[in-house]
Image: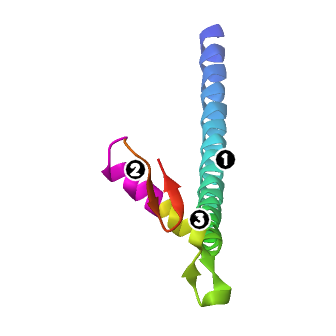
Amino acid sequence: MGLIFGIFLLSIRQIVNLLDNKRLMMLLAQSNLELEISKKALEDKHESLKQTSAIIKLEAETDFLTGGLLYQLYNCFLYKRLILVTTKFGEPKFICGCKVF
């Protein structure tokens, strides 16, 4: 009698575990779907921020009053960088009024 009662209780416990596992799998699938949706939204926001950053950088380097020419200071910065990369340390050079060391 005790053996049959024990097997009956184990069977009920297994059925309860199966139902609980099914519920947990559904919850996991739902959470995964929500995570994918939020990941997609985050990627869209990141792309938007990258585009905005590129626009701001272009605006910072461009003078719109002169028809889109680059600022003189930005040109000097580019020349300095170019010369520093291509030459070794030596006498300072002057380009477009900018002293380059």
Dot 1 and dot 3 residues touching (CB under 8 Å)? no
Q: Nearer the viewer, residue 64 or 101?
A: 101
Q: Nearer the viewer, residue 50 or 1?
A: 50
Q: In which quadrant of the rendered view does residue 59 lie?
A: bottom right
Location of mark 1 (residue): 27
Image point (68%, 88%), residue name? 65
Residue 82 lies within the magenta run = yes
Q: Nearer the viewer, mark 3 or mark 2?
A: 2
Q: Residue furthest top?
A: 2
First of labels 3, 2 by sequence position: 3
Q: Position of residue 43 (x, y in %)?
A: 58, 61
Location of mark 2 (residue): 84
Q: Position of residue 85 (x, y in %)?
A: 36, 50
Amino acid type of disc 3? Lys
| Quarter that holds the N terminus | top right
First of labels 1, 2 by sequence position: 1
Count the numbered circles shown.
Answer: 3
Q: In which quadrant of the rendered view does residue 83 lie?
A: bottom left
Q: Which residues are magenta?
A: 79-89
Q: Position of residue 100 (x, y in %)?
A: 48, 53
Location of mark 3 (residue): 50
Q: Residue furthest front?
A: 91
Direction from residue 100 to residue 33 in the image, left or right: right
Dot 3 and dot 2 residues touching (CB under 8 Å)? no
